[in-house]
């Protein structure tokens, strides 16, 4: 039986909708007091009001605008979320990836992907540890990706970013375990969310087939699939789990990433793709 989260304080970074929003909803429904942080203040204000209208007695819902890469912003969010006894839970669903052939990418954009996926987690961990130590321990949950442990041609920045995120999580879990702080992540497969327009567009165009062929359960994910795993890792049911990744992907990790070369041909043209396959640089992005 799931234990409730009444009396616990939580911060959800990137919680305006999609996976973060459903994760926040799961925590509130379990009785936690949740503060949501996102850059879009009007959007999170509306979402926080909607959550608050359905929150159980004693569960407070708050919001704060901020950038996950700005230490002062995250520190302010931690201070807003923490109760007098400290912070119990932090969930961060921040991440970004692009489908860009490596030979058409550039160092600036590649580094930006690493920053969004790794540095945002570093900032969250650094900001949350003191508040969680004050509380006598806590749980941090991050969203990685199934391709942290797979290859996915044309997504080198995202693969490297999520693999780096997981290395950071393992190291931090070891470093702060003596404080009772647990740090884990979830590896989602492809999730069809309103916050992921590329996925929504692939459905509209009837093009999720390549992904479905590599998914034994035969469907793409939805945000509530991931929210259940967030709830588990945030709560006392997972009190002996740290430094690990839980895969929630319909079984896609047992196969391989889909071949998206045909999509690149549609977007870039046959000539460009043939140059890429020959190891030639057609027109590096950003030059």
Image (cartoon, rainbow, N blue to C red):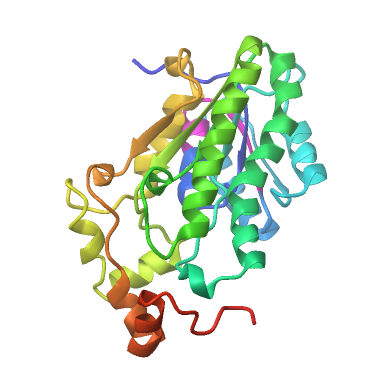
Q: Is residue 199 above or below residue 81?
A: below
Residue plotted at (43% across, 37% down): 186
Is residue 107 found left or right of 134 in the rendered image? left
Q: Position of residue 110 (x, y in %)?
A: 60, 62
Residue 27 painted magenta: yes
Magenta residues, start to end: 25-37
In the image, is residue 60 part of the stretch drawn in magenta? no
Query: Which residue: 17% across, 58% down?
Result: 213
Residue 151: x and y in percent read: 37, 52
Taking the spot 54% from the left edge, 27% from the top edge, the residue there is 170
Q: Is residue 70 above or below residue 168?
A: below
Is 190 displayed left or right of 17 in the figure?
Answer: left
Q: Quadrant of the N terminus?
A: top left
| Residue located at (28% from left, 76% from top) | 262
Of the pair 115 and 225, the residue shown nearer to us: 115
Task: Give how far across and how far down residue 102 sits, in percent.
Answer: 49, 67
Up-down relation of residue 158 to residue 235 (above or below) = below
Is 157 on the left or on the right of 219, as rendered? right
- Residue 210 visible in rendering: yes
Q: How far across and down, in percent of the image, does residue 59 sit?
A: 59, 28
Position of residue 146 in the picture relative to residue 18 (left or right): left
């Amino acid at each position: 039986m799931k234990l409730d989260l009444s009396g616990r304080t939580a911060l959800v970074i990137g919680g305006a909708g999609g996976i973060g929003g459903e994760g926040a909803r799961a925590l509130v429904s379990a009785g936690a007091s949740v503060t949501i942080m996102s850059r879009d203040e009007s959007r999170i204000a509306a979402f926080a009001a909607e959550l608050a209208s359905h929150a159980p007695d004693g569960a407070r819902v708050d919001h704060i605008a901020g950038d996950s890469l700005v230490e002062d912003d995250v520190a302010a969010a931690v201070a807003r979320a923490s109760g007098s006894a400290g912070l119990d839970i932090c969930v961060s669903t921040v991440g970004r990836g692009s489908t860009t052939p490596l030979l058409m990418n550039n160092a600036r954009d590649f580094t930006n992907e690493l920053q969004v996926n790794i540095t945002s987690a570093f900032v969250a961990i650094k900001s949350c540890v003191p508040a969680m130590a004050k509380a006598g321990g806590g749980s941090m949950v991050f969203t990685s990706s199934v391709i942290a442990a797979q290859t996915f041609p044309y997504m080198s920045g995202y693969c490297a970013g999520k693999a780096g995120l997981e290395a950071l999580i393992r190291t931090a879990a070891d470093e702060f375990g003596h404080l009772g702080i647990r740090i884990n992540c979830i590896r989602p497969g492809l999730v069809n969310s309103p916050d992921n327009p590329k996925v929504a567009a692939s459905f509209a165009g009837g093009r999720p087939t390549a992904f479905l062929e590599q998914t034994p359960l035969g469907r793409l994910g939805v945000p509530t699939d991931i929210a259940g795993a967030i709830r588990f890792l945030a709560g006392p049911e997972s009190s002996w789990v740290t430094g690990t990744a839980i895969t929630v992907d319909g079984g896609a990790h047992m196969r391989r990433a889909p071949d998206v070369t045909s999509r690149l041909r549609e977007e870039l043209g046959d000539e460009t793709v043939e140059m890429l396959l020959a190891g030639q640089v057609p027109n590096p992005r950003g030059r």
